[in-house]
Amino acid sequence: LDIVINHITIMRRRQSPNPYTSRQSSTNTTANPKLPAASIWLPILGHHLGIRNRKHHELLLLAIITSILALWFLTPFSDYCASCILWTVPVITDVELGKQSIVSLESKYPRVQDRWGVQKIGMELVKAGRNARYNDNNDNKFFGSIFDNIDEYEWDFGVVHAPNLVNAFALPGGIIRVTDSLLQHLYLSNGEIAALLGHEMGHVLHRHSQRRVIKQRFISTLWGAFVYEDNDGYEESFGEAVAEGLWKSASYLGDLGFSRRDEYQADAAAWDLLSATYLDNKYVLRRYHPNSVKKLLTKLWDFQGRDASATAGWESTHPGTEERIDALKEKWSKLDSRQKRRFV
């Protein structure tokens, strides 16, 4: 808004009404470094569009800025741009980013003894994901490409002490932490714990935290990667330069919230991971019904009605719980009888 206001003020102070009718005006505009670039190209654009009135130039600038902001914030365009940049970043760099992030997280929420079997259940899901990736039977088409990179992460599941904070954290590289308050208050079954961990694994596999950082700092991330130089004698690729820029954000990755789109993707990943435990294999000891994802969200929603302050952390980082429950109900209802028999 400051840029727009400054531009409008400068436009009103200009003496020449039209840059095309006064050579002196055009020369002065080019020579004066204090005038914004918009004062040069906007009248030219207006001329080509048949807009000669200076007031209309101002409205044109406002329309352009409004359109850009709407495109960025109200459409998936920003996600697409962030994904294109993130695609250049090697997955292996996520592991180092997660190791840096967990230091900050566990300085606030120290790790405690896992009395709920979180680590064991989490590793069962990792094995299920690996099995789904390498399964050669026709059931493999039931899953997408979500498990393609599952072996590139160093998975680590645990519990942290956080009084009155019902939440879970997914850090890059495969580090997942659940607060003891969530486990104590919700009395989750093993299937619901699996649903919770599968959801957080979905955030990791989709690299949601990194995408959020790139979206929030898009220009600085892009520019920093282009001009990056650390004088170590090694020429980093563009993606590696982006990764080193992300490391500067490691301290607050655990506090980042996710978008509703992120949440739906993570729910879908949890559904697929739990479904993968039903594949014929010798590695997964227990099977977890995919409907446990819906049961988990229902418990969270019901508990939120009883104690909104305790679940404020969950809702702030994992929005849209009620709508996601409805989406999961619809997903189950759309399965045919053969598909439902898979989970008997």
Image (spheres, grey):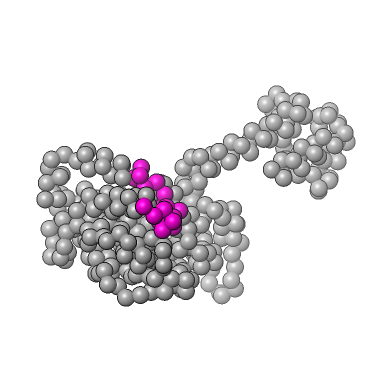
Dividing the picture into quarters, in which one does residue 6 lie?
top right
Q: Is residue 99 magenta?
A: no
Furthest residue toward top = 50
How far across and how far down the image is residue 213, in percent?
A: 51, 57
Q: Position of residue 61 (x, y in %)?
A: 68, 35
Q: Is residue 125 visible?
A: yes
Residue 130 located left or right of residue 164:
left
Depth check: give the residue in front, 273 or 89: 273
Q: Outermost residue, front direction?
A: 306
Residue drawn at x 35%, y 44% as measured from the top left: 322
Q: Where on the picture, by quarter, is residue 222?
A: bottom right
Quadrant of the image for the N terminus?
top right
Q: Is residue 313 left or right of residue 28?
A: left
Badge count = 0
Q: Position of residue 160 (x, y in %)?
A: 38, 70
Residue 166 versus residue 33: which sits nearer the camera?
Answer: 166
Q: Name the spot of residue 70 as percent of width and height, x first.
A: 55, 38
Answer whether residue 152 is visible to the viewer in this image.
Answer: no
Q: Is residue 309 magenta?
A: yes
Q: Residue at x 32, y 50 (%)?
A: 302
Which residue: 48% across, 61% down?
255
11 or 175: nearer the eye?
Answer: 175
Left or right: 295 in relation to 249 = left
Q: Which range is magenta? A: 306-324
- Residue 236 vs residue 268: left or right? right
Q: Residue at x 43, y 71 (%)?
A: 109
